[in-house]
Amino acid sequence: MPIMERRAASFRDLAGPRLLPVQSEPMPRNRTAETFYLSLSILAAGLPAVAVADETAEATVPQAPGEEPAAPSAASPAAAPPSEAPAAPQAQEEASPAPSVRHSVARVVSAGRVGSGVLLPGGEEVLCLLPTVQIGGPIAVLLGNGHSSNAVITATHRDLQLAVLKLETRATAEAAPTLAESGPELGDPVRVVGHGGSLGGDDQSLEASKLASFSELWAHIAAIPAGSAGGPAAGFLLDRRAGPQDLGAPVFNSDGEVVGLVVELLDDAAGRTRALSTPELREFIAGKRSTRPYRRPHHLQTWGGTGIALHNRPSHLAALVTLGFRAVLFDRLRIEPWFEVDLGTRTALTDAETGDISRPRDFWWSLETGLHIGYRIPLHREGNRNYFVPLAGFRLGWNRFQHSVEEISSLCGKGGLNCEHSLERSLDRESSFRAGFELGMDLRHNAMRIGYRIFLDPTNLQAHSMHRLVLTFDGVPLPVQIGDSN
């Protein structure tokens, strides 16, 4: 055989998955060929195994020049029966790989809120955090394997802040993970798999969010409460901080079992993450499911802010401080009683014919109260909570206008002699009571609202109007937030 053919055959035999039979006859020593083959063997050992293209070709053993090729022995793979050769590849095709852990991770979106969750055994339900879905709106679920479905709430746990969602379209049971029988140990390596969160905003941010979807965060167990000191739902701490939209994401151990669920991000604990362990969740997961539709939550909260008031006829300008209390029903209907203090000034009154000032500029203050009824219209994009709230109501106000009046009085004797002059100051006050209807609108972004109000006096619609621009913040000045007030 020519030397080039022998070298090619040798490389194929070294790189292929088959082993050559041991050569029984001694070969003539050719040091140059041995050195070349030894170098080629070292290079081939560092390369990945490459399957032989021609499975039926016989293995060729390099021979010295002038020698006849050796007959294949019984141990040679070429001598094996044709039916036994494909046995290994067939076994590999029949063994289906285990699904990835991310197939069980859920991306939960409800009324602009975005969170994570995990598919429960059976493929019909998803476990997530209650704050993500308790707004009561439509719920969309996307699994890591691409399965998407709408869902409804069938169970809630107020103390643990958990919810169970039932999928309208069932997922494959193979995608569901195994829930660990016991929690993790201190120092165990784990990974948090969440959808990565939604950045919101423009299309470029949404594309970046898709790239981060169902990403993995590797961490270690940093702390576990000892005994019952941490309470019945203490869970454990991770030494890494997950993303804000990864709340509700499952925590997997090295065997791919779910050992916990992310429930809180701790900013004041060196950037750590708190998770509930699986044994703490088992009782809730195995509990009863409700057949009634989930009722949207009601909530109560305070709000406060400041703004400016513009009036005409007579012209007024004032700064205002307003405080209110909001009661929300079914997360849409809003009833807001409020109280307001206005401090400002009123322009001077001038005689149109003579141009004389009949009333100087004065100080104006007002105490007002009222009630607004609004309806929330969402303007959100995914991950944001922006609302447009039209409102209507009434306003009652008690107004006080006052300005100083200075007069010089003279007292003279007979003949106009010995006159005494004195400056007398008095306070000219004017009080009035105001009542009427008020219309307005609020644009809300998270806890901040920018509002506009217009007052309509039913007795003098054309001659009198009041305009207000108000900036308010939820939870100010008293952080009273009861229910779903986020």
Image (tube, rainbow, N blue to C red):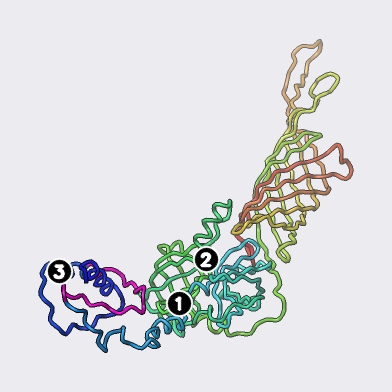
Q: Which mark is residue 195?
A: 2
Count of residue discs: 3
Q: Nearer the viewer, residue 386 or 358?
A: 386
User: Around disc 1, counting alpha carbons within 10 Å, would you say few (fewer than 14), some (14 to 19), or many (20 or more)?
Assistant: few
Q: Nearer the viewer, mark 1 or mark 2?
A: 2
Q: Residue at x 46, y 83 (%)?
A: 94
> Dot 3 surroundings within 10 Å: few (below 14), some, or many (20 or more)?
few
Q: Is residue 401 above or below residue 83?
A: above
Q: Amino acid under label 3? A: Ala
Residue identified by numbered label 3: 33
Q: Position of residue 80 (x, y in %)?
A: 33, 87
Q: Is residue 346 placed above or below 49 in the rendered structure?
A: above
3 or 1: mark nearer the eye:
3
Of all residues, the one furthest to the right in this rendering is 459
Give how far across and how far down residue 73 sits, in percent.
Answer: 24, 87
- Identify residue for label 1: 230
**Alpha carbons under labels 3 and 1: distance apart:** 73 Å
**Residue stretch in magenta:** 43-66
Q: Quadrant of the C terminus?
A: bottom right
Which amino acid is tagged 2? His
Dot 3 lies on which element? helix
* SS category of the residue bearing label 1: loop
